[in-house]
Image (cartoon, rainbow, N blue to C red):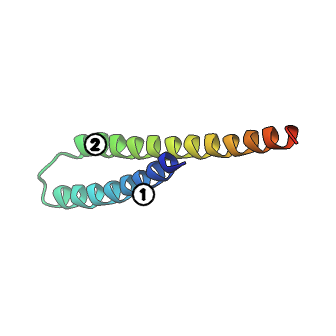
Amino acid sequence: ISLVNKINKLEEITDKLKDKTRKAHIKRMNKKICKPKGGIIYMDIIINLERIGDHLKNIANIVKDDIYVNKEQIDISSR
């Protein structure tokens, strides 16, 4: 379960990093440091990485809940 907590914390960090990179990217775009086409690809990659983090968090939480349900079923059946 502590692993699930770590995953949840890492996902929060991923969200913050996505926001930071987006803001930094907008600044670069405003300064014309990078080209719009490359910027779109860059942001797509960042957004997709953040989505992967969301999915991993969801999977971890579902597995955690499933473990609790199965543990309760085992406890009840052994009574």
SS category of the residue bearing label 1: helix
Q: Nearer the viewer, residue 26 or 58?
A: 58
Q: Is residue 62 above or below residue 27?
A: above
Residue that carries the numbered disc 1 in the rendered image: 12
Q: CA distance from mark 1 to mark 2?
A: 20 Å
Q: Position of 23 compared to 2: left or right?
A: left
Residue that appears at 40% across and 56% down: 15
Local packing at callout 1 (Cα closer than 10 Å; few below 14, some 14-19, many 20+) is some
Q: Which residue is at a point 19% across and 61% down the rendered structure image?
A: 27
What is the three-letter code of the residue carrying label 1?
Glu
Closest to the observer, 47 or 52: 52
Quadrant of the snapshot with the C terminus = top right
**Image point 19% across, 55% down: which residue?**
29
- Check the image and name the residue furthest to the front: 79
Query: Callout 2: 10 Å neighbours few (<14), some, many (20+)?
Result: some
* Nearest to viewer (mark 1 / mark 2): 1
Kind of residue at disc 2: Tyr
Mark 2 residue element: helix
Of labels 1 and 2, earlier in sequence is 1
- From the top left corner, tell me how far across and down residue 49 is, in percent: 38, 41
Q: Quadrant of residue 31?
A: bottom left
- Decide if residue 10 is on the left or right side of residue 41: right
User: Where residue 33 sits: x, y (%)?
Assistant: 11, 52
The spot of residue 7 in percent (x, y) is 46, 48
Q: How many marks?
A: 2
Whether 65 is drawn above or below 16: the answer is above
Residue where numbered disc 2 is placed = 42
Q: Which mark is residue 60?
A: none
Q: Residue at 85% across / 38% down in the picture?
A: 78
19 horizontally vs 62: left or right: left
Q: Quadrant of residue 22?
A: bottom left
The reply to whether the C-beta atoms of the residues labelled 1 and 2 are less than 8 Å apart is no
